[in-house]
Every structure is written in structure tokens, then in C-alpha cells.
Image (cartoon, rainbow, N blue to C red):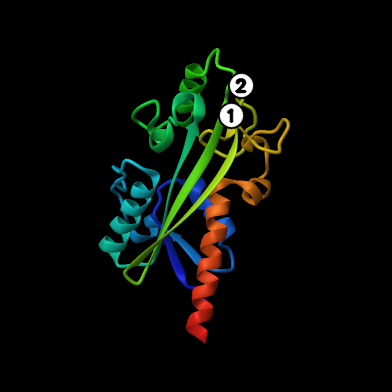
Amino acid sequence: MLPVLYLATQNPHKVEEIAHMLKGRFEVKTVADLGLKEEIPETGNTLAQNSLQKAQFIAEKYQVNCLADDSGLEVEALGGAPGVYSARYAGEPKNDLNNLNLLLQNLEGITHRKARFVTVLTYHSQGEYFQFEGEIFGEITYNAKGISGFGYDPIFRPEGEEYRTFAEMSLQEKNQIAHRARALEKFKVFVDQHSKSRDN
């Protein structure tokens, strides 16, 4: 029987990506399975703070093992923006298309379009918290392309790709290289090492 892991996120796209990556290691459940109706707080000044805050909120409220994710897009020409405010870049309510359009608008006339996606995962297990970071560099395209993924995927072309954005890749392709996938790989190594040490 697989151990149960609750994902401290209300974003169905993140749930899909994470569940896909953790298949066979955990029985992945969501905060909806816990009956959570309120929004998970994220008032930190950094991705790491937000990720920890989300994990603590779920762990303390329900006494369960959980995994929280906070991710952001950092654009060099915009001083690292939208960064920690990526999900709410265009204000409330959160809207992917509005965020994406505002970013393209703010980059009008700018040819230096280097950027990076960052994910910080926080794992809560038996009262302890562990963090894992993943990143991928790339650049912002001039127009949105593709229909897969979510968020800024249609305007982010990862390094090594000549033409395709994340939104033009399958979930499997994206999960081989993306920031969240890289953080999850570190998490999986950690879990495997800990389960081995418990078995010895």
C-alpha cells in the first residue's frame, strides 16, 4: 500500500503535474479530499516562505504529511518580476491570461527577454519540514504559442528549444525538464534515501 501524500495546492494543473511525477511512490490526494474550502494563505516575500507557509497551514490544520509548491517566473529585464507575485501579477482574481498579457505588455520594445522559472517544494513529514528547489532558464517569446500547460507556459521557451514553448510540449516532455519536475526529482531522491535508512 502506498503512503498517502496531500498536496497543499488548490491549482488543478499543479496537482496533475505532481501526481504524474509521483505515480507509484505515493497515493496523491488534494486538500479538497480533506474538505478544505478556504484559500490556502501565501503572504510570504519569497517563494520559499510561501511554500513553507502553505505546508504549515495544511500540516497544522489536519495533522497530515503534505507537499506544498510555490513557483514563480523571474524575468531579468523586469528586475526578477513577476517572481513571488506570478499568480497575481495582474491583480485579483487570479487569471492566467491577464497575467500573461500584462507581462508581454511590460516587455514591449525589450529584446533582452531572458527568464527563469523556479519552484520551491516544502515537504512536511512527522513534524519536520524539508525544502527542494528546481529551476529552468529560458526566454520570453513575443507571442503566446501552444495550448498545453498553464500560467506562463505559452510564452516561456526553455533553453535548448529553438521554437517550442512549454505550452507546445506534452506533459511528459515538460516533466522531463521543467522547474517543478527538477524539484520533484530532488524530493524523490530524498524520500528514497529516507525509506532506505528506515529499512536498515
Residue 50 appears anywhere in the view: yes
User: In the image, 163: left or right of 54?
Assistant: right
For disc 2, the neighbor class at 10 Å (few under 14, some 14 to 19, many from 20) is few
Looking at the image, which is closer to me, 10 or 134? Answer: 134
Q: Position of residue 18 (x, y in %)?
A: 53, 55
Earlier residue among tags 1 and 2 = 2
Which residue is painted at 38% across and 32% down in the image? 88
**Residue 104 in the image: above or below residue 69:** above
Secondary structure of the residue carrying tag 1 is helix
- Taking 101 as reference, is 146 left or right? right
Q: Residue 181 appears at what percent x and percent y?
A: 57, 52
Tell me, for residue 155, which label it has, or none. Answer: 1
- Can you tell which mark lies on residue 16? none
In this figure, what is the number of numbered marks? 2
Q: Amino acid at mark 1?
A: Ile
What whole-number distance in Å separates the C-alpha atoms at marks 1 and 2?
Answer: 6 Å
Residue 77 drawn at (x, y percent): 50, 24
**Is 66 situated above or below 37?**
below
Q: Quadrant of residue 109?
A: top right
Residue located at (67% from left, 35% from top): 168
Residue position for label 2: 143
Is residue 98 something that shows in the picture? no
Describe the element under mark 2 as helix, strand or loop: loop
Callouts 1 and 2 close, C-beta under 8 Å:
yes
Residue located 39% across and 38% down the image: 84
At label 2, which amino acid type do we have? Asn
